[in-house]
Amino acid sequence: MSTLTQRTSGLVQRRTEAIRSAAAEKEKESGGEEDEVRRGEEEDDDKGDSKETRLTLMEEVLLLGLKDREGYTSFWNDCISSGLRGCMLVELALRGRLQLEASGVRRKSLLARKVICKSDAPTGDVMLDEALKHIKETQPPENVQSWIELLSGETWNPLKLHYQLRNVRERLAKNLVEKGVLTTEKQNFLLFDMTTHPLTNSTIKQRLVKKVQDSVLEKWVNDPHRMDKRVLALILLAHSSDVLENAFAPLQDEQYDLAMKRVHTLLELEPEKESAKPNVNELMWAVVAAFTK
């Protein structure tokens, strides 16, 4: 009887160990996949920034557009709204969430190709995840130009107004407040009160400005395909949002002229030709095409 009990307990023990081993192996595999995704996202982030102050393209463009002391963007800037939506699409593309459909045998133009959800894995950013959810669930798919308009609310179709991402600047500013870059204040204008977000961490703003300046001055490589993809996207999208010159304002006249000359070199590139080259982000060039058409 005791021998039978020992055999049974040994069988149970071996079965339990086998189950544990299989579970551990499965957990290891899933953990490896998560690590791979995480590594990919970390490579896309700015290498010089700490984890707490790592900024998205949208946050960087907004930060360039904000007045340091006043804490708001220029009232005359009517480009930044659509520019920030373009930033979202490029950010999602750089993180491996979106891509353009295949160009096909007929070689469809960038603006004729639809935006496809490549991965619906959460990004950790509420607005990016919201935009990604819209794009994933929309059938038939839309092109880049349509998504910029839909996310901005610039559509005449009342059935598509639910795509609009509201209060984007305010929400981005709050993200920057949480990251310790900005603070929140109430300012009284003649007829109304307004929430503003003055700069508190000048180091991060200076680092951002210097990154933009260096990319077209000391670190200029005269070839967009040798430039860091995020920096190239930042320059092009900051220009589309009408905030790029803010980064060049502190420069001496000669440096300013040289910087703007090199920026115009980038702006004169033809997105269709550039997107056909190897190792490029096609969706980024589609966004550029949407703003320069």
Image (tube, grey):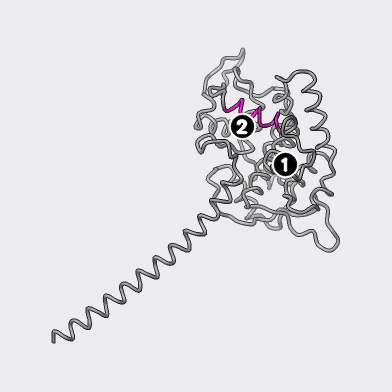
Q: Which residue is drawn at 61% across and 32% down?
A: 169
Element class at badge 1: loop
User: Viewer-proximal residue, 44 or 139?
Assistant: 44
> Relative to residue 253, is residue 95 depicted above or below?
below
User: Which span of residues is magenta-colored?
Assistant: 204-214
Query: How many numbered marks, from 0 up?
Result: 2
Q: Residue 242 lies in what quarter of the image?
A: top right
Mark 1 burial class by Cα count in 10 Å: few <14, some 14-19, many 20+: some
Mark 2 burial class by Cα count in 10 Å: few <14, some 14-19, many 20+: some
Q: Earlier in the sequence, mark 2 or mark 1?
A: 2
Q: Residue 107 lies in what quarter of the image?
A: bottom right
Of all residues shown, which one is farthest toward the left?
1
Element class at badge 2: helix
> Relative to residue 80, is residue 21 depicted above or below?
below
Q: State the image coordinates of residue 99 (x, y, percent, origin top left).
A: 69, 54
Quadrant showing the N terminus: bottom left
Q: Name the residue under label 2.
A: 169
Q: Name the residue under label 1.
A: 227
Q: Which residue is drawn at 62% across and 49% down?
A: 95
Q: Is the magenta stretch mostly helix, strand or loop?
A: helix
Q: State the image coordinates of residue 37 (x, y, percent, origin top left).
A: 55, 54
Magenta run includes residue 55: no
Quadrant showing the C terminus: top right
Q: Residue at x 80, y 32 (%)?
A: 262
